[in-house]
Image: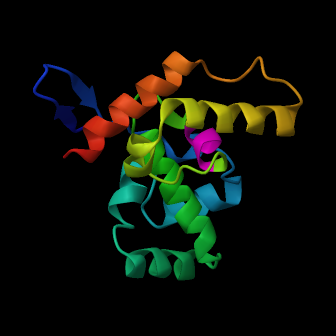
Amino acid sequence: MKTYQKTHGISVQVRDFPIAQLPGLSNENQSQLEGCGISTTAQLICQTKTPTAKALLAAQLQVNIRYVNKWVAMADLASIPSVGCEYCGLLLHAGVASPAQLAQMPVGRLHQQILRLHVATMQRNDLTPSVDRVQKWIEQAKLFSSH
């Protein structure tokens, strides 16, 4: 795992998860990815660094490239420790597609987007992450995007 360090003494370790923990990934897709030598989120990110590599993987898996792009975006967001696989899908559905984009988001606006998403999809707002948690995501994303 890589460790990103800021001059203020704050360090953040990049997270790596089994590919099966990515939300929305079917068992069939998981098996296909593993068949291509991809069993972790870090391996997925590493093997899809270019648009050509993503297109090649989509062709190998015989899936639309939008699925590969979605999986890579979630894996990238999941690499932020405070986000992980628990919140990467939520962020993606709230319109955040990368750690760099997350780093630029105003806390209040992102929290409101997530709150609206929870109310619209689950008819409840008590499951919405706190403003402090959202702030932590953004702070850690800034560490990632500065390197």
Measuring from the top left, give residue 69's x and y in whole percent: 53, 66
Task: Tell which residue pokes out farthest to the left in this image.
Answer: 7
Horizontal side of 86 relative to 82 (left or right) equals right
Give the residue drawn at x 19%, y 46%.
147
Measuring from the top left, give residue 41's x and y in whole percent: 44, 48
Q: Is residue 115 above or below residue 74?
A: above
Q: Is residue 116 above or below residue 93?
A: above
| Magenta span of residues | 88-92
Would you say the magenta stretch is mainly helix, strand or loop?
helix
Measuring from the top left, give residue 101's x and y in whole percent: 43, 50
Q: Is residue 53 magenta?
A: no
Visible in this render: residue 40?
no
What quarter of the picture does the N terminus occupy?
A: top left
Q: Is residue 69 above or below residue 147?
A: below
Horizontal side of 111 relative to 136 (left or right) equals right
Measuring from the top left, give residue 56's x and y in whole percent: 46, 81
Give the residue drawn at x 54%, y 36%.
85
Q: Is residue 44 above or below residue 59?
A: above
Give the residue drawn at x 55%, y 76%.
58
Give the residue drawn at x 31%, y 38%.
142
The one of 82 and 101 positioned closer to us in this rendering: 101
Visible in this render: residue 51?
yes
Tally the marks.
0
- On the image, which quarter does residue 43 sit in? bottom left
Horizontal side of 42 relative to 59 (left or right) equals left
